[in-house]
């Protein structure tokens, strides 16, 4: 019996030593996965997109509008920006973006 107890005590000590070596990895791996998941969640958060200068457009029912063709003149809209929401009223004409000249872009000279 004494030999058997000594053998079991040795096995227990060996397993305790192995657990002590593995403990940092066992704790770090889930923490790393959690941190990676938090980064992924932050990258998918639409508020980060709003902070870059985009807006979410919603119709009168609160549904997100994804196409200009879905907006008819007179439709009340809600625009969500990074810092809040504002109401808007759709006009009838299509707005064409103006071409903005960059500061370091020289004006075009004459050829003749």
Image: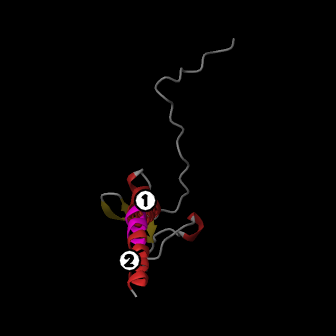
Upstream in sequence: badge 1 or badge 2: 2
Q: Which residue is most to the top?
A: 112
Residue 39's quadrant in the figure?
Answer: bottom left
At a point 38% along the width and 84% down the height, the residue shown is 2
x%, y% of residue 75?
46, 71
Question: Camera-side residue: 26 or 109?
Answer: 26
Q: Which residue is most to the left?
A: 83
x%, y% of residue 90?
46, 65
Mark 2 lies on a secondary structure that is helix
Which region of the structure is painted magenta?
15-22
Labels 1, 2: front one? 2
Residue 49 can be seen, yes or no: yes
The C terminus is located in which quarter?
top right
Which is the main secondary structure of the residues drawn in magenta?
Answer: helix
Taking 53 as reference, is 93 left or right? Answer: right
Instruction: Decide: few, some or many residues near mark 1? Use Cα within 10 Å; few <14, some 14-19, many ≥20.
Output: few
Residue 19: give its label. Answer: none
Question: Disc 2 marks which residue?
Answer: 9
Q: CA distance from mark 1 to mark 2?
A: 45 Å
Residue 21's quadrant in the figure?
Answer: bottom left
Question: Disc 1 marks which residue?
Answer: 39
At a point 43% along the width and 78% down the height, the residue shown is 7
- Magenta-span inclusion, residue 28: no
Mark 1 lies on a secondary structure that is helix
**Are dots 1 and 2 in contact, CB under 8 Å?**
no
At a point 53% along the width and 46% down the height, the residue shown is 97
x%, y% of residue 1?
40, 88
Count of residue discs: 2
At a point 40% along the width and 75% down the height, the residue shown is 12
Question: Camera-side residue: 104 or 42?
Answer: 42
């Amino acid at each position: 019996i004494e030999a058997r107890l000594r053998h079991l005590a040795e096995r227990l000590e060996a397993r305790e030593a192995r657990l002590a070596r593995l403990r940092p990895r066992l704790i770090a791996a889930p923490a790393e996965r959690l941190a990676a998941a938090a980064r992924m969640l932050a990258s998918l958060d639409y508020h980060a997109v709003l902070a870059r200068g985009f807006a979410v457009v919603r119709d009168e029912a609160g549904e997100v509008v994804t196409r200009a063709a879905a907006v008819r003149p007179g439709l009340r809209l809600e625009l969500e920006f990074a810092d809040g929401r504002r109401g808007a009223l759709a006009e009838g004409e299509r707005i064409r973006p103006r071409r903005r000249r960059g500061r370091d872009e020289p004006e075009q000279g004459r050829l003749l």
